[in-house]
Image (cartoon, rainbow, N blue to C red):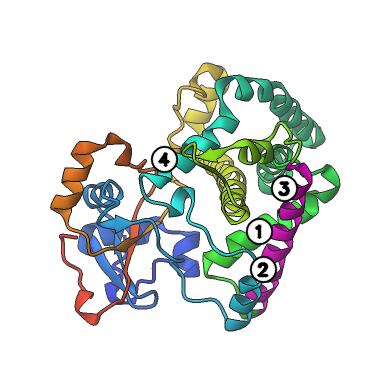
């Protein structure tokens, strides 16, 4: 591996996003706690340190803004016209995190998932039929994108006639938080995010008296901790994360799996000959090409001993580590004294 100049590494640069593994390897070996000047924060890349950060929400909070540089003021002003931000799911800390997670899990009970199986299989078959005779496929546009997009749209009650809008909204959220969009694209994404909020706010109002049997209905019927119903801002936050988690990450996972198989022809041959290997997780792309990396945390002023005491009282505070390969840490007020490539977080 060619030597990299650590001071010049920008973990969320376009080059790093498109081919991150060489950079992550260099950071793990030479600077597992790395200050990123462009983002004003620290990247932690060693497994033990990543695990420590993700399992300590009192000291490292999920209530953190985007890892990227601030979007242009014009885009910020557009977003400000929409719903207020709400910390739910991946931007909430325990115990609130578990309350939201429990709520969303009601949409994916074993019985409900089993009911979806045949429709998902039929959709996958129909997509394959469209390119099977040609003997070749552009995997992203012809399969990896439309399959999860249609599934998530159905769960959110989006009709087929609005699929192009739904894709544009999903892309807008991803581009806006991705930090690589130009000024003009950021402004366009902000407008599309507001359009998405307005669409689903209208649907939620429409269904409030008669919730449908989908994700919108689950949220409308739910109460947070059996105390109060979700407000519109919370539901919008959950919907946007659901779009990204169910759509973008599934697309990335499908593409990463096939990329791995194409580069490992022996494994591809083995899977073709024994389909039972597929559900057993024999293709390790979830570990080697995690689509949710990196995760972001804010360094708090809480003490580690206080967290250990609270963890002993409540096991529900333990958060899932998901599939993060590295963690981005930013203090509430960043100081130059935090700049370090120390081997301890």
Residue 205 at x, y percent in the picture: 75, 49
Q: Nearer the viewer, residue 231 or 14?
A: 231
Q: Nearer the viewer, residue 281 or 95?
A: 95
User: Which dot marks residue 310?
Assistant: none
Residue 177's image quarter? Answer: bottom right
Residue 153's image quarter? Answer: top right
For label 1, the residue is 171
In the picture, the quarter occupied by the N terminus is bottom left
Structural crowding at the residue carrying mark 2, measured as other residues with C-alpha within 10 Å and reported as few (<14), some (14–19) or many (≥20): many
Say which label, 3 or 4, has the lower sequence index.
Answer: 4
Residue range highlighted in magenta? 184-208
The nearer-to-camera label among 3 and 2 is 3
For label 3, the residue is 204
Pointers 4 and 1 in contact (C-beta within 8 Å): no
In three-dimensional space, the C-alpha distance between marks 1 and 2, rounded to whole angstroms, equals 8 Å
Q: Residue at position x 48%, y 56% from top?
A: 87
Q: Residue at position x 54%, y 63% from top?
A: 85
Question: Is 190 colored magenta in this rendering?
Answer: yes
Q: Secondary structure at mark 2?
A: helix
Say which label, 1 or 2, has the lower sequence index.
Answer: 1
Residue 39's image quarter? Answer: bottom left
In three-dimensional space, the C-alpha distance between marks 3 and 2, rounded to whole angstroms, equals 22 Å
For label 2, the residue is 189
The nearer-to-camera label among 2 and 4 is 4
């Amino acid at each position: 591996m060619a030597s990299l100049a650590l001071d010049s590494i920008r973990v969320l640069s376009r080059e790093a996003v498109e081919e991150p593994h060489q950079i992550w390897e260099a950071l793990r070996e030479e600077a597992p706690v790395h200050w990123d000047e462009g983002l004003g924060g620290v990247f932690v890349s060693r497994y033990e340190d990543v695990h420590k950060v993700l399992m300590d929400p009192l000291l490292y909070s999920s209530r953190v803004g985007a890892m990227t540089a601030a979007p242009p003021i014009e885009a910020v002003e557009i977003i400000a016209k929409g719903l207020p931000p709400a910390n739910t799911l991946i931007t909430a800390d325990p115990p609130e995190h578990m309350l939201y997670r429990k709520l969303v899990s009601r949409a994916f009970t074993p019985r409900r998932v089993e009911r979806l199986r045949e429709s998902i299989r039929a959709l996958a078959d129909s997509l394959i039929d469209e390119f099977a005779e040609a003997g070749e496929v552009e995997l992203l546009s012809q399969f990896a994108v439309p399959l999860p997009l249609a599934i998530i749209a159905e769960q959110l009650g989006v009709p087929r006639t609005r699929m192009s809008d739904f894709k544009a909204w999903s892309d807008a959220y991803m581009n806006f938080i991705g930090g690589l969009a130009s000024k003009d694209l950021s402004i366009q994404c902000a407008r599309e995010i507001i359009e998405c909020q307005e669409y689903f706010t209208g649907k939620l109002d429409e269904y409030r008296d008669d919730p449908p049997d989908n994700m919108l209905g689950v949220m409308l019927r739910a109460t947070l901790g059996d105390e109060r119903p979700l407000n519109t801002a919370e539901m919008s936050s959950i919907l946007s994360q659901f779009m990204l988690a169910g759509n973008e990450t599934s697309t990335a996972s499908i593409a990463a799996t096939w990329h791995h198989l194409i580069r490992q022809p022996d494994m591809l041959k083995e899977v073709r000959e024994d389909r039972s290997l597929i559900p057993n997780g024999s293709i390790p792309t979830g570990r080697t090409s995690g689509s949710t990396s990196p995760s972001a945390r804010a360094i708090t002023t809480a003490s580690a001993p206080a967290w250990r005491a609270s963890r002993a009282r409540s096991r529900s505070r333990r958060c899932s580590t998901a599939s993060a390969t590295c963690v981005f840490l930013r203090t509430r007020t960043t100081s130059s004294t935090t700049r370090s490539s120390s081997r301890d977080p």
